[in-house]
Amino acid sequence: MKSTTIVPPNHPHVIIVGAGFAGLRVARGLRGSPVEVTILDKNNYHTFIPLLYQVATAGLEPEAIAHPVRRIVAAPNVRFRLASVTGVDLQQRRVTTHAGDFAYHYLVLAAGSVTNFFGLESVAQHTAALRDLDDAETVRDRVLSSFEAAAAEKSPARRRALMTTVLVGGGPTGVELAGALAELRRHVLPRDFPELNVSQARILLLEASDRLLEAMPQRMQRKALEKLQNMGVEVQLGARVTGADERGVSLSDGERIDAGAIVWVAGLRASPLAQALDAPLGPAGRVIVSRSLDLPDHPEVYVIGDMAHAGGRDNPPHPMVAPVAIQQGDLVAESIIRQTEGKKPLLFRYKDPGTMVTIGRASAVARVYGVPFSGFVAWLLWLTVHIVWLIGFRNRALVLVNWAWNYFTYERGVRLIRRRR
Ligand SMILES: Cc1cc2nc3c(=O)[nH]c(=O)nc-3n(C[C@H](O)[C@H](O)[C@H](O)COP(=O)(O)OP(=O)(O)OC[C@H]3O[C@@H](n4cnc5c(N)ncnc54)[C@H](O)[C@@H]3O)c2cc1C
């Protein structure tokens, strides 16, 4: 492969791997600075991951939560290259990609995370995950396809199984998905499938621990559980999935649940790129970095966002959430500028703004700077924060129009099956 070098003399070349929450913030912080920046991403778009569950439940089209990277990073000293990164040569200071090699003076690795199936092969093979836009469309396809199959099914028992959706993982994504699916079942599917008794459709949320939403205060955990139960979601706590096949899941206590669609949202681990670094890894395969977020012995290499375990092995890892990625991105941009001026990089300290989870229509639970909220107020907060965070006027407009439409008509306009199994 030919090496691609776009380094003008005297200007250090910064390579950023990943145009996610973390990578984009670094690029933004370096705009107009005396460095040349190249962002590499395997996709030419940035995905607003917190709204994936709405694509998965037919509430939003994928285009509403994706934005072209070239548009976002437009600046004279920032370039984008569509490239899937396969490795890093720390000694030669080169990144290898499917589109050639790239030389760097500073490297920022921000390639995010992938679904963690915890080594359960059958689960990886037979369940749908939710980590990117393709996954979200797969979830939507599978849920809708299973209802189509139910409509053609003669056996009542099999029909009921096909109308069962199993969600594995009681974190924010599992709870949000369960709430949105319950709305779909209540307001949309009975109209679409008059030949089915949709009131028999089941939504099961399985969680291995004894609570939902681990990071929330106990009171909010209870509220979320009650709300889901009121919406007809069957929540099973202490339910550990050990295997899956085309027709359902098996639990550690021997129980078997037949289902038309199974969605695995039980965990994430760092991008496999972490293993290519030959650096120490912490839990979930995250790269152990210093308090300045660089690699031991490589002050020119930063690892941030979901890929990073900051502050050394003994420090508890930061959660894999967007505010961590954003704050780390901001800090690293500043540190790189300082390094080019011969100064020391800054130390990272996370300021936790809290967490928010919607549960269906006009309801949410939230902890904002330590203060708990629930119900309509929390939902309004959630709505505002997500619209503000979304990148691009067009996307904001699309999402707002969709939400208003869904709210007033109880519709889910994107009920398309695009790929069939
Ligand atoms: C379903 C779901 C819902 C979530 N909801 C929330 C929420 O509501 N609030 C919240 O705070 N957090 C939420 N999170 C977590 C949040 O999305 C992540 O913590 C955040 O995206 C991490 O940012 P990042 O920059 O590290 O990775 P990402 O934002 O994932 O960006 C990684 C980028 O790297 C690119 N990439 C990956 N591998 C390669 C490669 N080999 N070569 C080139 N490019 C590559 C990807 O295409 C992507 O653009 C959610 C996560 C999921 C999965």
Image (tube, rainbow, N blue to C red):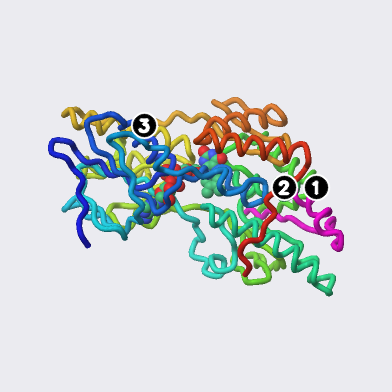
Tell which circle, 2 or 3, labels the residue nearer the N-terminal end. Answer: 3
Residue at mark 1:
187
For the N terminus, the quadrant is: bottom left
- In the drawing, what numbered circle is on residue 330? 3
Camera-nearest residue between 163 and 410: 410
- Crowd rating for badge 2 (residues with CA inside 10 Å; few <14, some 14–19, many 20+): many
Element class at badge 2: loop
Q: Nearer the viewer, mark 2 or mark 3?
A: 2
Residue located at (56% from left, 58% from top)? 129
| 189 drawn magenta | yes
Instruction: Please state if 225 lies on the left or on the right of 306 as rendered.
Output: right
73 relative to 113, above or below: above
Percent from the top left, x then y, of residue 370? 56, 26
Instruction: Please state if 187 lies on the left or on the right of 355 as rendered.
Output: right
Q: Using the numbered discs, state the Cα–Cα distance from disc 2 to disc 1 in whole angstroms.
A: 9 Å
The furthest residue to the left: 9
For the C terminus, the quadrant is: bottom right
C-beta proximity under 8 Å, tags 2 and 1: yes
Residue 320 visible from this viewpoint: no
In the rendered structure, which amino acid carries the disc numbered 2? Arg
The stretch of residues the image draws in magenta is 184-207
Residue located at (34% from left, 39% from top)? 311
In the rendered structure, which amino acid carries the disc numbered 3? Asp
Residue at mark 2:
412
Percent from the top left, x then y, of residue 399? 62, 38
In the rendered structure, which amino acid carries the disc numbered 1? His
Camera-nearest residue between 270 and 314: 270
| 121 drawn magenta | no
Residue 257 visible from this viewpoint: yes
Tell which circle, 3 or 1, labels the residue nearer the N-terminal end. Answer: 1
Element class at badge 1: helix
